[in-house]
Amino acid sequence: MKFYRSHIILGMDTPSLLAGAKGVRDTLEKELKAKKIENEIRIVETGSLGYHGVSMIVYPEGVTYTGITASDVKELVEEHLIKGRPVRRLMAEDNSQKDICAGQQERLLDGQVRIVLKNAGSIDPENISEYIAKDGYMALGKVLAENTPKDVIDIVKDSELRGRGGAAFPTGKKWEFTYNTESCQKYVICNADEGEPGTFKDRLIMEGDPHALLEAMAICGYAIGADKGFIYVRGEYSLSIERVKKAIKDAEALNLLGKNILNSDFSFEIEVCLGGGAYVCGEETALIESIEGKRGEPRLKPPYPPVCGLFGKPTIVNNVETFANIPQIILNGGEWFKKLGVQGSAGTKVFTILGDINEKGLIEVPMGITLKEVFENIAKGTRSGKKVKFAHIGGSSGNIVPFKDFDIKLDLNTLASSDLTHGSGVILFVSEDIHINDYLKSIAKFFQHESCGKCTPCREGTFRIYQFMEKLNRNQAKKSDIAKMKDLCMVMKKASFCGLGQAAVNPFIDAMRHFEKEMMEGVKEGER
Amino acid sequence: MTCCNVDVGEILKGYSKEKGNLMEVLHKVQDSSGENYICDECMTKIADHTGLPLNKLYGVTSFYTMFSNKKRGKYVIRMCESSPCHVLGAKNVIDSFSKELGIKVGETTQDGKFTLEYCACLGLCAVAPAVMINEDVHGNLKPEMVKDILAKYE
């Protein structure tokens, strides 16, 4: 095996590519060649490192550089790689203050615990050997050699893992339903139709660690008795589609997917399906319709997919993040997972934190952290220096939490007891200069466009809400409009056919509760 | 009526109902057209091959915002207008695109080069406000950057 004296880990996710990561890599290769050290130093491309701009870490020192441009490369090569003197002006802020050798891991672990994102940003996602070196496919090997399908389901049940797509249904229970349903054919579907505004965790998992997803799907297939899986990725995620497709090919070549995996009698193959830009396809039955080649309109439930799903067969639909937890649960056991997090909400949760804050990005924290801790310790306050007005958690269909309520704990039970949801895990911080009516209008427009049109409460309701918001923004609303909107929201919540319409009203109901006075500013003069 | 000259037969060879890849076939046909749409003739061919009634197939293509049965520009500019982009000033960026190209959202430039469209969240919120031009991503946008971005497309 070839020996390298240094490894450069270069983040090559979408935002980095956008910031010119490709140019940096090409220049780096050229410089290494020019200095004739290309055989001593290896460049490893990986997913997001969690920084802004083009970033890289040089090992073994563990020095992190951020905001690199192609013109910095020459200096980096000469100073750091040849002379051994780190270039301070490019170093990530947090490790220039600390000891140089205290690398990136520490920053990431600052309040965070990584299970799902364990490998993202530290391995080359396009190289299956690197995943295998990090215990990859060991969980699959273990279950095939040592466990019965029933054992696997018991481990997952013990872990108390709950679905990470938004509904938080216990994963083990779901698998058990399908396991108990007799059928000649069953399916595993991974829901990667990430459309909730503000969410991009699934994209980063697929871009940073695609094999973890494949491994988990195969384990699920083994547990429930399915030999076919589908990954439904939204059509706009071209890099994810490319990486997942390559990962499938590589895994098949090593017999980690395909016929008789690892010489067992278990076979499992995975297809990638593309979405077409319809938000409603994140709803599991709509997604199934879409894979079948139909309009993505939700089905009447029950029967639920674990009993009657794709092509009428029992089907497991799990979110990318849910699956990404599975290999670690199998390797470390359910008890280990349960200990992370709090009672009733096991494990960690990946959040995307956004908006007017200093540290935007993806974080993975144990369940039970408070919103204030996220805002102050991880997001590090507002970027503009203005006061934060509210946080919108769970995506557009999530809840609006005003600043005064920031002490709330972000775990499933606490949230549920306050009628809140963390949905897909977005936390969007909005500062005081954004008017609530303006903000709500952008949400109303989104839902008006994305309602699939199947049921009247949602189709008409989302349209009417948008009209109300338009009127409020033009200061043309009547006082009675607000009361009407309240009624309408209740009707939609109770009578909509699927989760889209039921949840679409959440931010409006919250806003009317917390910001009614501000909303009233949109009512005509003299009618307030 | 002219066909967009896509070798639909070749693309359809990869189709199988069990693989659940009708959507992928539609994406491929549209991407190969050069004008970002699926023409009527191709629709008929796909319907014949798959055994789907043409009206059902039309139901599918009209349901998903990424597909179009009308000619679009060589480059489709998808502008995100979801809340994370909105709070960081997406409106001004969208207006800037519209002004530079001299068209409204939903329209195509006269030379058939660009089509402007709204779209829902692109999952690029870390670099909001963001747009996609065909497969390319552009983020951290400011209105004054639009002109240079458009100049890159020929």
Image (tube, rainbow, N blue to C red):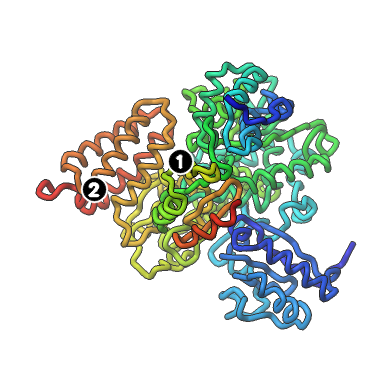
- Snapshot quadrant of residue B92: bottom left
Q: Quadrant of the N terminus of chain A?
A: bottom right
Report the disc number at residue B107. Answer: 1
Q: How many marks?
A: 2
Q: CA distance from mark 1 to mark 2?
A: 26 Å
Residue A60 image position (x, y, % from top left):
75, 72
For this view, does B85 lie left or right of residue A250? left
Q: Chain of mark 1?
A: B
Q: Position of residue A105 (x, y in %)?
A: 64, 67
Badge 2: chain ID: A
Residue A167 drawn at (x, y percent): 48, 39
Q: Nearer the viewer, residue A305 or A142?
A: A305
In this view of the protein, which residue sits in the foreground, A232 or B74? B74
Q: Is residue A37 left or right of residue A240?
A: right
Element at badge 1?
loop
What kind of residue is marked 1? Glu
Q: Which residue is mark 2?
A: A474
* Residue positioned 66% across, 75% down in the render: A72
Residue extending furthest toward the left: A526
For the question of whether residue A394 can be seen, the reply is: no
Q: Quadrant of residue A465?
A: top left
Q: Residue at x 20, y 52 (%)?
A: A521
Q: Residue at x 64, y 16 (%)?
A: B51
Question: Do circles 1 and 2 both sit on a common chain?
Answer: no
Q: Check disc 2: other Cα within 10 Å, few if <14, some if 14-19, many if 20+.
A: few
Judging depth in this view, the residue of B136 and A386 nearest the camera is B136
Three-letter amino acid code of the residue under disc 2: Arg
Q: Is residue A183 above or below residue A235?
A: above
Tell me the SS state at disc 2: loop
